[in-house]
Amino acid sequence: MLDLLFTKAGGVCVLIFVVLAGLIGWHFEYGTEATVKFQVTGLDDQGGYNSHKYLVTTTLIGGDQPGKIEVFEDTDAWLHGKMDSSDVWARFVNAGAGAVWQCPVYGFRLFITSSYRDILDGCTLISKGNPAALPRV
C-alpha cells in the first residue's frame, strides 16, 4: 500500500514538473517576442566543436532604450521555424557596418549561459551600411 502511494506521488510530481517546464519553455520561446530596430556595429562568427552561433553587435534605435548597445545572436530556432541562420547572417554581412535593421527577436540575456536574444526571420533592411568598414572577429 505504501509503495502505491509513493508511486502515485512520484508520478504526480513528474507530471507537475513536465507541465511547469513546458510553460517556462513556451514563455521563453513565445512570451518574449519583440520587434527591435538597430544599427549594426560589429559581427562575430563564433564556431565551436558542436555548435555555431553568429553574434551581431548593435546600437538600439528608438524603443524604450535608444542608444543602448546590445548583442543579439543569430542561431537556428526550430520552434519558430527558423533554420536559415547562415542566410540571415549573410544579409547582415552584405549590408555592412552602419546598416539599420528592424528585426523580430525573442528570448533574453542570460549571463550564466552566455546566451542573447535571438534574431528571427523577417528582418527588414532600412538603410544599407558600408561592408568594408564592418569589424569582424
Image (cartoon, rainbow, N blue to C red):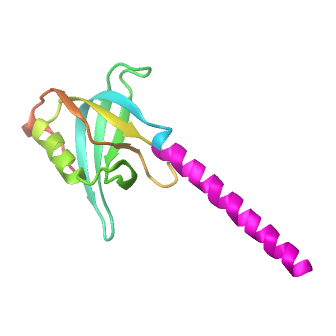
Is residue 100 left or right of 106 when viewed as pictured? left
Q: Which sits in the foreground, 36 or 134? A: 36
Q: Which quarter of the rendering shows the N terminus? A: bottom right
Asked if residue 13 is positioned above or below residue 134 in the image, the reply reads below
**Which residue is at 48% across, 55% downward?**
113
Is residue 127 left or right of 118 when viewed as pictured? left
User: Is 23 within the magenta?
Assistant: yes
Bounds of the magenta span? 1-29
User: Is 15 within the magenta?
Assistant: yes
Residue 55 seen: yes
Is residue 114 left or right of 124 when viewed as pictured? right
Q: Which sits in the foreground, 89 or 123? A: 123
Provide residue 106's location: percent of width, then percent of height.
Answer: 41, 40
Provide residue 8's location: percent of width, then percent of height.
Answer: 80, 71
Residue 108 seen: no
Q: Residue furthest left?
A: 132
Q: Which sits in the foreground, 64 or 130? A: 64
**Which residue is at 10% across, 41% downward?**
94
Provide residue 59's location: percent of width, then percent of height.
Answer: 31, 29
Q: Residue furthest right?
A: 1
Magenta stretch, overall SS: helix
Provide residue 90's location: percent of width, then percent of height.
Answer: 15, 47
Q: Which quarter of the picture shows residue 38? A: top left
**Which residue is at 28% across, 57% downward?**
46
**Which residue is at 31% across, 54% downward?**
76
Asked if residue 52 is positioned above or below residue 117 in the image, the reply reads below
